Amino acid sequence: MAPTISSDVLVGPDNPWGPETEAILYSENLFTITIRDVILDPFQLRKLGELKLDYPLQTLILSNIFGAQTIGSINIVLGKLSQSFIAIREIDISNNALGPSVYIIINLLKSASSINLSNTGLSIEDFNGVSNHFSVDLKTLSCCRNYFQGCPSIEHLHKIENLNFSSCRIPRNDLNKLISTISRLPSVRKLNLSDNGNSIEDDVIVNLCTKLAVWSDIEEFSLADIGLTAIQSRWILNTLKSGSYFKLQHIDMSFCRLRKIQVLGDYFLSLPALKFLNLTGNKLTEERIIEITRKLPNCTVINEVFE
C-alpha cells in the first residue's frame, strides 16, 4: 500500500537539486517527482535511477533534464526507472531527445492516465510502436512538436479527453485519417491539431462537425493553420452557432480563411463560457476585430499582426 503521508520532489531553475532533494527521494513518503528545465549532472541522474518504489507514483515529470553531455545516459536512466516503479498515473518526459528510446519506458506508459511526449524527437514509427500499449483508460495525451510522417494510432483510446498533436508536420492524407479517427472518439474535451497538413477533405470536416455536434462537454479546440478552406471554416462556425457548448472556453481558428465571412462575431454569441478566441492570420481589419470584441465582452480576442 502507498504511504498515507506524501512528499513532493520539485527541482527547477529556481529550486536547484540539494541535500533535501535526495532526502525526499529516498524517503518512504514520495508522491510526486517534478524535475523541469534543469540539466542534471551524471551524479544526479544516477541517484534518480537508483529509486525503488513498491507503490504507485502519482506524478513523474522529467522535462528537459538531459544535456549534450548526458544524452548518452538517457537509455540507462530511463531503463532503470522503468523497472523502479509499479505504476505512474501522470508521466511527462517532454523536451528530451527520446526518439526510439521511448520503447524503454513502455512499462511506465501502460498504467498512465496522462502522458506528455511533446518535443521528444519521435517519428511516427516510434509513437505507433508504443501507443498500442497505452491504457484504454488514458485521458490526456500530448505529443506536439514531433515529426509524424504518418497517422498516429489512437483508435483504441475510447476514454481520451485531451489530445494535442499540434506542430507534428502530419501530411495531408494522414491528417485526414487522424481527424476521421478522432471523430469516432466519444469523450473529447480538448483538441489541438494546429499547424499540420495543408488541406483537408470536405467529408472529413463534415464528419468532424457531426461529431462536434455531440461533444457537448468540449472545452477547447484548435484547428489553426491546417489548410481549412473558407467553406470548411464556415461549416465549423455554423456547427458552433447551432450547438449547445456551454463549457467551450478556448477556440483557436487562426489562419482559417475567415476574412470573407460576414458578421463573424455572431457565430460565437451562443458560447457563454468563451474566454479566448484566436483569429490571427485571417486578414481581418482592426474595425472588424473591434466589432467582434464588443459582441464578446467577456472574451479575449487575439489578432496578431505580422509585418
Image: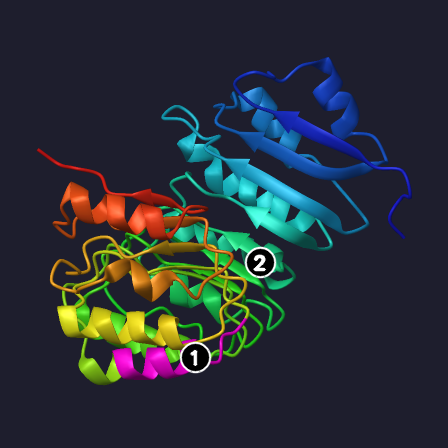
Residue at label 2? 109
Residue in the foreground of this view, choosing between 79 and 126 = 126
Spot occupied by residue 8 in the image (x, y as percentages of width and height): 74, 32
Farthest residue, direction left: 307
Q: In the rendered view, does 23 fall on the left or right side of 162?
A: right
Say whether disc 2 or disc 1 marks the residue closer to the N-terminus.
2
Could you say which is closer to the camera, residue 209 or residue 246?
246
Quarter residue 27 falls in = top right
Q: Nearer the viewer, residue 298 or 128?
A: 298
Q: CA distance from mark 2 to mark 1?
A: 32 Å
* Circle 1: residue type: Ala
Residue at 90% in and 53% down: 1
Kind of element beneath mark 2: helix
Residue at 59% in and 65% down = 138
Which quadrant of the structure image shows residue 228? bottom left
Task: List x then y, in percent, for residue 219.
Answer: 50, 60
Say which element carries label 1. loop
Magenta residues (range): 205-216
Query: Magenta segment, principal secondary structure?
Result: helix
Q: Where's the C terminus, which quadrant? A: top left
Q: Is residue 108 magenta?
A: no
| Left or right position of 208 against 47 | left
- What colour scheme was applied to this rendering of the protein? rainbow
Amino acid found under the numbered disc labelled 2: Leu
**Residue tagged 1:** 213
Residue 49 placement (x, y as % from top left): 63, 35
Is 159 displayed left or right of 230 in the figure? right
- Name the one closer to the observer, 305 or 127: 305
When the figure is inspected, residue 24 is found, relative to residue 80, above or below; the finding is above
